[in-house]
Image (cartoon, rainbow, N blue to C red):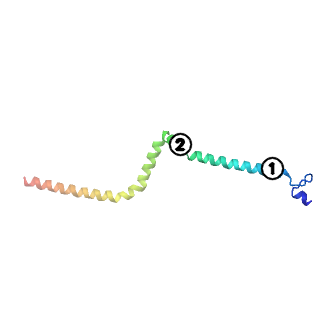
Amino acid sequence: MVQDELGIDEETGGPSVAPIIAAAIAAGIAAYLIRRSRQAEEARRQPASIAAAAWSRVQDPTARLRAADATREWIAERMVPELKPVLLDLLKGVKDLVDQGFKKAEKAIRDL
């Protein structure tokens, strides 16, 4: 009984060959699948495939519209709040310079 449970072949007196062959086949299939998945990952990461994917994205007719929309959203969300105080100070400076220019022009006209 114990010999049957261990997989010992009664005719030859040694271990049964079928479980060994089945385990070897299973290991071979697993190794093949792992190697194939790694080769597919490497093929996707090659510079030529990356360039081809980028070129196909550029050829998309809506790519420009999506890029413009993303740029507009980024500027509206990030840049405008940060630049708003700078633009207001710049506008105030321009206003002061224009006022000084008009005062000089008025003075020049009065002195005529």
Residue shown at 73% from the left, 49% from the top: 28
How many tags in the picture? Answer: 2
Q: Residues within 10 Å of mark 1 (few under 14, many from 20)?
A: few
Give the side of residue 112 with respect to residue 49, left or right.
Answer: left
Residue matched to label 1: 21
Give the side of residue 26 with respect to residue 34, left or right.
Answer: right
Q: Residues within 10 Å of mark 2 (few under 14, many from 20)?
A: few
What SS does tag 1 mark? Answer: helix
Asked if labels 2 and 1 touch by Cβ distance under 8 angstroms, the answer is: no
What SS does tag 2 mark? Answer: helix
Type of residue at label 2? Ala
Residue shown at 29% from the left, 59% from the top: 89
Q: Nearer the viewer, residue 89 or 43?
A: 43
Residue matched to label 2: 48
Give the side of residue 38 with respect to residue 3, left or right.
Answer: left
Type of residue at label 1? Ile
